[in-house]
Amino acid sequence: MDLHDFGLAPDPEMMRQPAAERRQVLRWLLAGAAGLPLAGCGGADAGGMPASTAASATGACTVIPEETGGAYPADGTNTHGGSIINVLNQSGVVRSDIRASFNGATGVALGLPLTIELQLLNASGGCASLAGYAVYLWHCDRDGLYSLYSAGVTAQNYLRGVQETDGAGRLRFTTIFPGCYAGRMPHVHVEVYPSLDRAAAAANRLKTSQFTFPMATLNEAYGAGGYAASARKLAQISHATDQVFSDGARLQMATVAGNATDGYVATLTVAVNG
């Protein structure tokens, strides 16, 4: 197995970690690549196969729901402070590790380690893997703040990045576990593009959606240091009352492995009409 971000250069942040930490990261990545179940196309497995494998085998998968990009997309579709914010055409946005800011900004988002592994499938093409597509992914920090928009982090652009899918339609982001802010369940935003080149402009996006995490995982994660405020806000909301997930989150519920000590790996299959 190639651990170099599916054909990209080795991650410098990972290489600077102590050897023991690098070994732990590699164990998480290998565990994910070895076949952690992927939720999204049909949810439960069929015949003992992970949902993604079963969906591909049967040629039946369901397109992930279209959702709002929210108020903080930084994809050129809105303004903040009178200026259009767009990271999609900035140098450095194509990266797997999104914890640090880029393109001249120097901040780093702190929090519980989280690896996000996505697989794109073509719902209108027999659920075939979508190789060479791209995903722009972003989320809030552990304090519920969005880089470039929220007070205190407007000079940062961390927790935003673009990745291209490999031959199996897969990609991976290294990030932190997102926090919870008032009125919303913890979530991650994604925009799907037909290619890496076309991911430089939001007008080319094929799908905008969000995904979330199981409540048991959220409760466990927010027991870790730095997430006390998120735990208090989480206690006031649920998936059933969330403005995005209240109509059902089966196709947007990540499968999560790991723990609040070592970090988590979240996997999701995202079906779109390719």
Image (cartoon, rainbow, N blue to C red):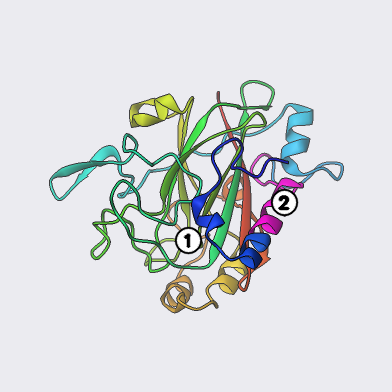
Mark closest to the chain's N terminus, 1 or 2: 2
* Badge number at residue 30: 2
Q: Nearer the viewer, residue 204 or 88?
A: 88
In terms of secondary structure, where does tag 2 sit? helix
Disc 1 vs disc 2: which is toward the camera?
Answer: 2
Is 101 magenta? The answer is no
Specify start and end residues of the magenta stretch as a single range: 25-41
| Residue at (73% x, 34% y) in the render | 55
CA distance for labels 1 and 2: 26 Å
Residue 56 sits in quarter? top right
Dot 2: few (<14), some (14–19), or many (≥20) neighbours within 10 Å?
some
Q: Amino acid at mark 1?
A: Pro
In terms of secondary structure, where does tag 1 sit? loop
Residue under circle 1? 186
Residue 19 sits in quarter? bottom right
Q: Position of residue 129 (x, y in %)?
A: 66, 28
